[in-house]
Image (tube, grey):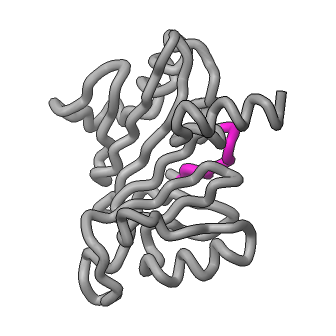
Amino acid sequence: MDFDLDPPVGVGLLRIGMPRDAANTALASLRDPTATSDSDRPGQHVFRPSDLMITIDCMHDALKAIELSRPSTQADRVLYRDLDVFALPARDLVERMREHTIIEQHPEDPASFVAPDLLLSFWRPFEADDPEEEQGYFTTVLLARPGYYDTPAQAAERLRRDG
């Protein structure tokens, strides 16, 4: 199954800002009924047979973020503008993303990159660029509204600027 990242809107039926109950229902619909996982946590995350984990983050009764983890098979793909974000080596993905948007290395975590205008955030446990090694690929991608990572001062500035 393909999961198309549509920042800042969402992924498939999961839409940023939707009510928690609707997000829980949408998340449950992404389970494979023929291969459910004992690790699934309703309202938090589901695992698909490919090992793709889909996690939701709700606050104030609304969906704030969606995180997807790297599957172990190609049965599930996570795409942004036809880029398979987990099939491309991390540095290649960053270069290709730069054709569409600004993407920056996190100043405190060189293994992480954020596209602040979208909010897409790519993470791996440590920086390593050998595409022959598992760590040469991103492990997770998070989709949220721009401002998700803002400090209180940044949130106030964003509100002043956009409000």
The residue at the far front in this view is 153
Looking at the image, the residue that sits furthest to the left is 38
Q: Nearer the viewer, residue 35 or 40?
A: 40
Classified by dominant secondary structure, the portion drawn in magenta counts as: strand
Number of labels in the image equals: 0
Question: Dividing the picture into quarters, in which one does residue 36 lie?
Answer: top left
Residue 147 falls left or right of residue 51: right
| Residue drawn 26% across the image and 24% down it | 41
Is 89 drawn above or below residue 144 in the view shown? below
In the rendered view, tell whether residue 29 sits above or below residue 90: above
Q: Quadrant of the C terminus?
A: top right
Answer left or right for 95 relative to 89: right
Q: Which residue is located at x 61 percent, y 49 percent?
A: 119
Residue 156: horizontal and vertical position, in percent? 67, 30
137 versus 130 height, above or below: above
Check residue 6 for magenta coloring: yes
- Magenta residues, as a range? 2-9
- Which of 134 and 95 lies nearest the eye of the viewer? 95
Between 125 and 21, the one lying in front of the other is 125
Q: Position of residue 53 (x, y in %)?
A: 33, 44
Taking the magenta stretch, the answer to whether it contains residue 58 is no
Asked if residue 7 lies left or right of residue 120, the reply is: right
Where residue 78 appears, as percent x and y from the top left, is: 51, 57
Q: Quadrant of residue 153?
A: top right
Q: Which residue is at 70% across, 53% downward? A: 117
The residue nearer to you, when weighing 85 against 106, is 106
